[in-house]
């Protein structure tokens, strides 16, 4: 079969040139006679791959020198515990902003390690908007402020970076990192599971200001201590080498594409095409407040939910796959990360318009 | 360059047919139009890959139905904390057998969570043997007994499974699992990082008797709770899907090779060839008590350590790579896991004999 346009929320599409290079190097990476997955992580071949990937990520995001970049395992779900274990301090409290399913999971896990103050929540509005800066009732002396810039399930994205007046800002960027330029210096810690915009599942990126680490709560597993990983350049134990390599290929591809400014322009255009299609129709609907609509995850419902299965089936027949919405919100969801070509969005728009003409 | 014989202790060689299949399926897994790394872990394609991998592993190891098989992240180093957090119980104690570098790491981490009794240690003998059954001074009422059947660094392997009289036996099988048949029912928990005999780094296999899980210590991160992963079939969060797929290809290859009985015969022969070469020579030496010599990791020293670099350089020129010993023991180490062809061992033996003739 031809390659499909896969709208999965994650794991998600990878750039075709990345896959092609990984394929070509599978049995022999650059004359080494080995697949990257076969290399000792302490050998010079893999060390060069790892260092280049970090350098490229630092260049793409313009990460300041006082931030560590960690290549970890365990996904954002592990970070939900690692963050309080590393940043909360004994007896401390943290502020959390609740904007959707992933915020809620982060909050529930953090509550197991200390005091969590939910300083704003949009739950009463069914998570269809981002709270405004002046809604955030920040706590004096909080160890950090945690938020989810992009909620993958609800398709809500903050149109601004919260101002925390010097309190470290912690951001779950799993589904938005690398979609556009960001000012890393405004954050204390950024984390992201790889399986949306970075690479294969099984790799987790953490970018952390180095003065924040090294004071874990008692009982923190060694493998949950950022300082251990930072001091060992993410090689305290065997890292997920192949995923790290593929992430490096993605970073190289992003540079080839013109970097994050260029990606932001494409991503904004892709999202606008979909939201315009939805808004121009009385058949499709997206409930999110327009300024807070996600560039990456576009949930939408059909006027008649009985047509959902037909929509999904017909879309799939046209090579437009994994459009079913998350079970908690229903309907459809088109995730359009960096690796989704604009042509894929165009094809989805054409299909949606045709489907509405026939079924609407 | 042609494929090399890579004697890395891990990440290590993968079977060439596995790599070839992964290469061929990189842009399109079986007509899906997707790489496996691009698939939603909750979609039917990946669910079938995951289920097949587990079924094949269960068949290879004849895992009883009352054991859960978990596909996790974080490596054996994470297990060092997860095991006491899940099995120790508050105020409990555990017995640990100390036979080398990895035992020591497991012991150090477990001590952070409760009482650890080291019930036998071969440290006074520089970790060159396995303790006998009657050396194990097991503690009445211990929550479990932990040991390391194969010490990857020292090249020491237990020639027997310790009898624990009903106390759950926990085994770090990172560098021995799948090298031969085992009787899983003798163990409470078996764990292994994938990067030796299973697949790419970033995947960790845990096989655990289901009655042992579900009682974690307070403060255990959700992601460190075996029960959470067991109840969600290792999909509580996004698993390392591509590594899981490659592990599945390895399991299929093992079945094609005739299963673990057949692998054991080849592995015993490969190891014997190397140890025979060492023992027949006054130039090479292995310090390990013969009954406890590892089938998987063969450390050896040259009579003249000044020749180490020459040995490594000349070997590499012949396509025999990553032979340098671990920094803590020096000399050489040939790791000869399942994926190392017997021809690779033959080539190493021939090179060693030739080197000795010229330099010895």
Image (spheres, coloured by chain):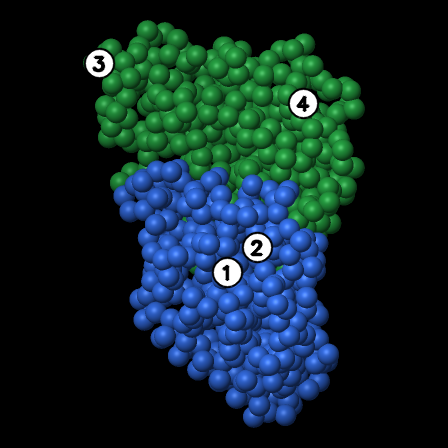
Chain colours: A green, B blue
How much space separates mark 2 and mark 1, taking CA atoms?
10 Å
How much space separates mark 2 and mark 3, taking CA atoms?
57 Å
State if disc 4 and disc 3 touch (CB < 8 Å): no
Name the disc covering residue A117, or none.
Answer: 4
Name the residue tied to disc 3: A359
Q: Chain of mark 3?
A: A
The secondary structure type at the circle numbered 3 is helix
Task: Judge depth for marks 4 and 2 and give the one in front.
Answer: 2
Q: Chain of mark 4?
A: A
How much space separates mark 3 and mark 1, taking CA atoms?
55 Å
The residue furthest front is B140
> How packed is label 4: few (under 14 Cα within 10 Å), some, or many (20 or more)?
some
Name the residue tied to disc 1: B189
Q: Residue at x 38, y 27 (%)?
A: A327
Q: Chain of mark 1?
A: B
Q: Residue at x 44, y 82 (%)?
A: B269
Q: Residue at x 24, y 28 (%)?
A: A313
Q: Residue at x 35, y 16 (%)?
A: A301
């Amino acid at each position: 079969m031809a390659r499909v346009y896969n709208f999965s929320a994650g794991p998600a599409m990878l750039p075709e040139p990345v896959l092609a290079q990984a394929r070509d190097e599978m049995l022999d990476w650059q004359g080494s006679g080995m697949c990257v997955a076969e290399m000792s992580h302490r050998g010079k071949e893999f060390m060069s791959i790892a260092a280049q990937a970090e350098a490229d990520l630092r260049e793409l995001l313009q990460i300041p020198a006082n931030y560590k970049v960690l290549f970890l395992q365990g996904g954002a779900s592990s970070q939900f515990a690692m963050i309080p274990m590393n940043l909360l301090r004994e007896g401390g409290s943290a502020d959390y902003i609740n904007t959707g399913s992933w915020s809620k999971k982060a909050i529930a896990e953090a509550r197991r390690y200390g005091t969590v103050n939910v300083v704003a929540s949009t739950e009463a509005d069914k998570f269809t908007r981002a709270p405004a800066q002046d809604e955030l009732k920040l706590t004096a002396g909080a160890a950090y402020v945690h938020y989810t810039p992009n909620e993958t399930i609800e398709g809500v994205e903050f149109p601004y970076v919260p101002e925390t007046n010097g309190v470290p800002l912690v951001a779950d960027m799993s589904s938005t990192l690398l979609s556009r330029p960001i000012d890393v210096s405004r954050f204390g810690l950024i984390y992201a599971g790889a399986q949306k915009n970075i690479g294969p599942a099984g790799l987790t990126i953490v970018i952390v200001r180095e003065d924040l680490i090294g004071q874990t709560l008692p009982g923190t597993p060694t493998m949950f201590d950022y300082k251990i990983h930072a001091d060992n350049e993410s090689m305290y134990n065997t890292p997920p080498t192949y995923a790290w390599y593929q992430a490096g290929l993605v970073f190289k591809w992003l540079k080839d594409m013109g970097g994050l400014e260029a990606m932001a322009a494409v991503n904004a255009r892709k999202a606008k095409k979909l939201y315009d299609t939805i808004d121009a129709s009385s058949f499709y609907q997206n409930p999110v407040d327009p300024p807070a609509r996600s560039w990456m995850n576009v949930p939408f419902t059909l006027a008649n939910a009985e047509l959902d299965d037909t929509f999904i089936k017909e879309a799939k027949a046209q090579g437009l796959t994994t459009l079913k919405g998350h079970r908690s919100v229903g309907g459809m969801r088109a995730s359009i990360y960096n690796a989704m070509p604009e042509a894929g969005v165009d094809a989805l728009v054409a299909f949606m318009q045709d489907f509405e003409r026939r079924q609407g």
